[in-house]
Amino acid sequence: MSDRPNTARVLALGALGVLLLIVVPWTLAVLSGVRPIILPSGWQLLDAADFLMRTDVLLHSTWVSLVRVNLGFLLAVVTAVPLGIVLGRSPLLFAAFEPVVESFRFVIPFAWIPLAILWFGTSEFGKLFIIWYAGFFVLLLPTIEAVQGIDKDLIAAARTLGATRWTIFWRVAFPAIVPDLLLAMRVAFAVCWIAILAAELVASRAGLGYMITDARELLQTEVVIIGMVVIGCIGAIYNALFIRLQRLVQY
Amino acid sequence: MSHMIEARQLTKRYVNERTGREVLALDHVDFTIAAGEFLCLVGPSGCGKSTFLQMVAGLEQVTEGTLTINGKPIAGPGADRGMVFQSYALFPWRNVIENIRFGLEIKGLSKAEMNEIAHAAAHQVGLHGFEHAYPKELSGGMKQRVGIARALANDPPVLLMDEPFAALDAQTREMLQEELLSLWQGANRTVLFVTHSVQEAVYLGSRIAIMTARPGRIKTVIDVGLQHPRDITAAAFGELMKPVYAALKEEVLKAAVSARALA
Ligand SMILES: Nc1ncnc2c1ncn2[C@@H]1O[C@H](COP(=O)(O)OP(=O)(O)OP(=O)(O)O)[C@@H](O)[C@H]1O
Ligand SMILES: [Mg+2]
């Protein structure tokens, strides 16, 4: 195991990275006289943020998007994980599902927008469908692999110690795949969150994705950038939460 | 004398679920293991030693013939037969005591009873002071001690061991062989022990069964008339190794020839 680096140093390095990679080049660009519509200055950005906060647009958009992504992600988990467990256990079912699974996972969520609109219209289901779809395959394959990869001797040991199927599932198979599941969930959540933009292109009236699309049409570059920053920050927070969870089950 | 484990015309065929291909692993095996004996099973790789052990454990179904324990057909795994694995097969999310306790939890003992038995078993195999360590923190030898203690906690009359010491270094292996012998001598336990090492078989076994190349049958059974503790440097020990070694070598060569014929 590598030594855990100390927190203060990690934070300082992170801040330095933000400064060198974003703030400095940005400031130079603004100082060199780029038009605000191409790249607004920091002050203009703060102004716009202040406006978005006062009118409640930013919080509302964020809330709407968070509810959507959490629901869609949850749907993906409760469908993909049980199916993955079943497919991981049965070579025959897996052989039947494999072609479908292996081809669908290359069709990105954006490609589903037209069908989602045709099928679900302007209802919330269309957006949830896109997010669910984004997370589903990212969860399914790792779940199957995790189940297939369970050490057969662990199951055999449990059986020789008198365990029933039920006990084996909850006390052996499940704990054995939890670390892999959490990793898959972390990746899947990221993919769902990235797909929020696609989802909110489906006849949407609210959400961060909608806010960005709308602002682009009105040439409000500041709002577009603020939306991007919020999406990035929320993604990073969720990622950190999942990493915490993963640490709890590092056997 | 009652026969602890008895195989009559025991045949095992594996069928690959996906391809439908069949493998004949054991072919009409007739064999009896007496209560209280330490039986070592040797044979070329792939001859069906693990298969036989797993059928006795109840982990694999009998294809044809009968396999009984105390006259009753083996239908599935049971707490009367403990198993020890070459890979240790410890639950990595459980510490030493929690691993040893697994079988007792299934029996539904009270927490106090479980802990008493588990600690006693840990002590018995020299795990004192490591009760709360996790498997990844243990050496191979310590891991296998946990594996043995976990099997013993259920107090099974039959102990099945599939190359339990094969992954250990020579010194650790000798120590564990020693400890296993004293565990066996102390209780009236039947041990079925698979190994690739002729020396290990002659050192531990009351009898040594040598299997043929696949499909596996029992080729010969050799009685080891030596008293414990045995001296591996003694002339009598070397004399006993010779026939075992010769029989094994013959079968290993056959296995190699048929493998080449397939290739
Ligand atoms: N689950 C299974 N499905 C199909 N074939 C199997 C299965 N398990 C074992 N076999 C085959 O049965 C034969 C006997 O295998 P087994 O593992 O019992 O041999 P072994 O004597 O223990 O070998 P080794 O010394 O290498 O451990 C081999 O040809 C093996 O490929
Ligand atoms: Mg084997």
Image: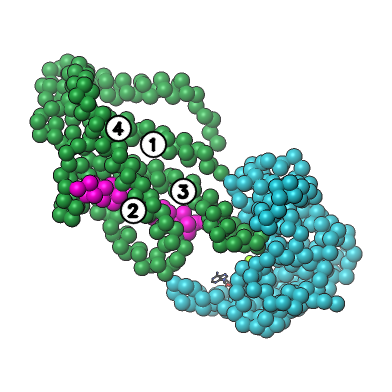
Chain colours: A green, B cyan
Q: What residue does disc 3 label?
A: A180
Height in image: A146 above or below B31? above
Please give the name of the residue rendered at 42% of the width and 35% of the height, measured from the top-left corner.
Answer: A241
Query: How far apart are labels 3 and 4 at the CA level?
Result: 25 Å
Q: Which residue corresponds to mark 1?
A: A239
Q: Helix, strand, or loop for circle 4?
A: helix
**Secondary structure category for the residue under label 1:** helix
Task: Tell me which corner region of the image, top left, top right, bottom left or bottom right, holds residue A53.
Answer: top left
Which residue is labeled 2 in the image? A137
Residue at screen point 68% across, 46% down: B96
* Upstream in sequence: badge 2 or badge 1: 2
Q: Which residue is mark 4?
A: A232
Report if residue B82 lies within the magenta region: no
Most foreground residue, B67 or B126: B67
Q: Amino acid at mark 4?
A: Gly
Magenta highlight on residue A131 = yes
Q: Which residues are magenta?
A: A123-151
Q: Could one spot residue B183 in this view of the protein? A: yes
Helix, strand or loop for disc 3:
helix
Residues at marks 3 and 2 on the same chain:
yes
Subunit bearing disc 3? A
Q: Quadrant location of residue B4?
A: bottom right
Residue A191: percent from the left, percent from the top?
Answer: 31, 44
* Label 3, label 2: how far apart the Cα atoms are: 15 Å
In the image, the residue with mark 3 has its CB under 8 Å from the nearest atom of ligand 1: no
Q: Tell me whether the residue at label 2 lies in contact with that at label 1, contact meaning CB atoms closer than 8 angstroms.
A: no
Instruction: Judge whether residue A28 can be spotted in this image.
Output: no
Q: Do residues under tags 1 and 3 come within 8 Å of each other at their CB atoms?
A: no
